């Protein structure tokens, strides 16, 4: 017996939402950029925070001073404690989603510490659910700090290889910048930028000052200074068309790159 569907009149009435022809009709439509002047600065846990006060405090002072002049969202990574947790969790056979849930707790701890260190600049730890409050918080003079692990948690996608969650803190910073329509996304690392191999273990590693996401995907590198998922997502991004990687151990680099100076590595969407 055929039954009629209860419908609400709309342009997508009766559609499956996966038909390619339908999806193409919405391709290229502009999306609202909620914060087009925002600079998202991601501080690596492994590359910055784990080095302690000698590296972290000068960088936070620099970011704090910049925040008096420009809109800044600070995103924190996890670092050594994530690696320890993953080591134990992988040994115990934890599912990828459980590992993602646990990793998020550690980048949250770093966000709390960084927000406290930024308190002279009105640093305030915010949660992922607070992103839509950023325009108001910025008007109040707040310097927001958020942890980088995206909130997939137990719903994390299975990894293409192995079990380590593919969406980690670089990816979370990218997704936050994309949804907010940010002007800049800067990843502060402990190297000068992207290399063809790990420069700490391979003396033949060559520095890459500029590259497209397509080119980087084609290279299929054994190791990278950023998460591969960021590069994959850039191919479909609507707002974040560049990702900048700089050495956060060198004072002044964040200010220089936000001023448009060509330092570090720039990964372009096309």
Image: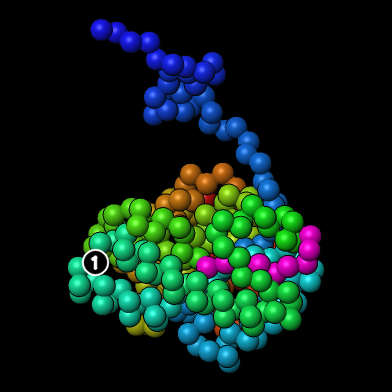
Residue 10 lies within the magenta run: no
Residue 106 locus on image (x, y percent): 44, 74
Residue positioned most to the top: 1
Residue placed at 56% from the left, 76% from the top? Answer: 112
Residue 115 locus on image (x, y percent): 62, 76
Residue 140 lies within the magenta run: yes
Residue placed at 48% from the left, 85% from the top? Answer: 50
Q: Which quarter of the figure has residue 161?
A: bottom left
Q: Which residues are magenta?
A: 139-147
Residue 208 locus on image (x, y percent): 48, 67
Query: Which quarter shows the N terminus?
Result: top left
Residue tagged 1: 94
Residue placed at 25% from the left, 62% from the top? Answer: 95
Foreground pick, 137 / 242: 137
Can I make out residue 217 in this image? yes
Foreground pick, 26 / 17: 17
Residue placed at 32% from the left, 76% from the top? Answer: 85
Q: Which quarter of the figure has residue 226?
A: bottom left
Q: Secondary structure at mark 1?
A: loop
């Amino acid at each position: 017996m055929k039954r009629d569907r209860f419908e609400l009149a709309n342009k997508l009435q009766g559609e499956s939402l996966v038909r390619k022809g339908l999806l193409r009709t919405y391709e290229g439509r502009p999306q609202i950029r909620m914060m087009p002047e925002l600079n998202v600065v991601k501080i690596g846990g492994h590359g910055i925070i784990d080095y302690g006060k000698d590296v972290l405090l000068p960088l936070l002072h620099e970011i704090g001073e910049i925040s008096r002049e420009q809109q800044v969202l600070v995103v924190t990574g996890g670092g050594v404690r994530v690696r320890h947790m993953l080591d134990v969790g992988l040994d115990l056979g934890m599912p990828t989603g459980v590992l993602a849930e646990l990793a998020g707790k550690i980048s949250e701890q770093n966000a709390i510490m960084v927000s406290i260190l930024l308190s002279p600049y009105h640093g305030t730890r915010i949660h992922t659910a607070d992103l839509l409050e950023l325009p108001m918080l910025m008007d109040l003079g707040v310097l927001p700090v958020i942890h980088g692990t995206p909130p997939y948690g137990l719903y994390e996608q299975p990894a293409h290889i192995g079990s380590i969650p593919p969406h980690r803190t670089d990816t979370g910073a990218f997704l936050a910048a994309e949804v907010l329509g940010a002007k800049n996304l800067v990843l502060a690392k402990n190297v000068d930028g992207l290399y063809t191999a790990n420069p700490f273990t391979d003396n033949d590693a060559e520095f890459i000052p500029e590259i497209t996401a397509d080119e980087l995907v084609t290279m299929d590198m054994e190791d990278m200074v950023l998460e591969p998922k960021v590069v994959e997502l850039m191919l479909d991004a609507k707002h974040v068309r560049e990702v900048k990687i700089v050495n956060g151990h060198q004072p002044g680099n964040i200010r220089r790159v936000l001023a448009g100076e060509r330092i570090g590595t720039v990964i372009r969407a096309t």
